[in-house]
Image (tube, grey):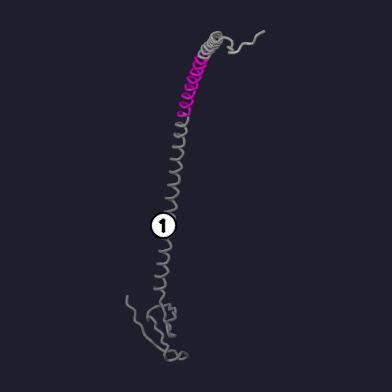
Amino acid sequence: MKFAFSTFTEPELPSSARILVARHSLLAVPLIAPQNRSMYVSAEIIAIVVSAAGVVVTLGASMFAGFAWILRRIDDRGDAVEGKLGVRIDAVEEKLGARIDAVEDKLSARIDALDIRLSARIDGVEEKLGARIDALTGEVTGVKIAVARLEGPPRHLVTASR
């Protein structure tokens, strides 16, 4: 479809202002052009612009809705995976806790047994050493007495007469 444009001058406008009109359109809308010129746009052009804007808005809204739907699905799947992992982690934690408690109990029993054995050995060694020290004390006392007898009373070079 071709449009034929004509220019004409209205009597109340200055001579430099010209108006461009499509001949076969039923509705013409003026657009302000630079330098005080007016231009009329047909209803078909306005409908095309409005429908293009509607298509852009519709596509934008549908893209936004699709993105929101994808985010919601990802969140739902993440929550499901998190729940499953939480259950598995709790089970592993219980198993490990039980194993650690068993090992701790075994180690505590072994440490207590070693403590008892070492205490008994230390007590035995202490008694033996105590007996040996007491025997040495008696022997040292005997040696002191023997040394004192060997030395005798101190000898005096000058004897006093009585």
- 146, 114: nearer the viewer: 146
Tell me the quarter of the image containing the C terminus.
top right
The tally of labels here is: 1
Q: Residue at x 44, y 57 (%)?
A: 64
- Per the image, label 1 sits on a secondary structure element best described as helix
Q: Amino acid at mark 1?
A: Met
Q: Residue at x 42, y 54 (%)?
A: 67
Q: Give how far across and how far down residue 29 sits, in percent.
A: 44, 78
- 52, 83: nearer the viewer: 83
Q: Residue at x 48, y 18 (%)?
A: 114
Q: Residue at x 41, y 74 (%)?
A: 43
Q: Quadrant of residue 159?
A: top right
- Using the image, determine if residue 118 lies above or below residue 91: above
Q: Give how far across and how far down residue 115 sits, in percent.
A: 51, 19
Q: Which residue is mark 1?
A: 63
Q: Give how far across and how far down residue 109 sits, in percent.
A: 49, 19
- 5, 70: nearer the viewer: 70
Instruction: Tell me where the magenta segment starts and ends, as one range.
Output: 95-123
Q: Quadrant of residue 80?
A: top left
What is the crowding at mark 1: few (fewer than 14 residues within 10 Å), some, or many (at least 20)? few
Tell me the quarter of the image containing the N terminus.
bottom left
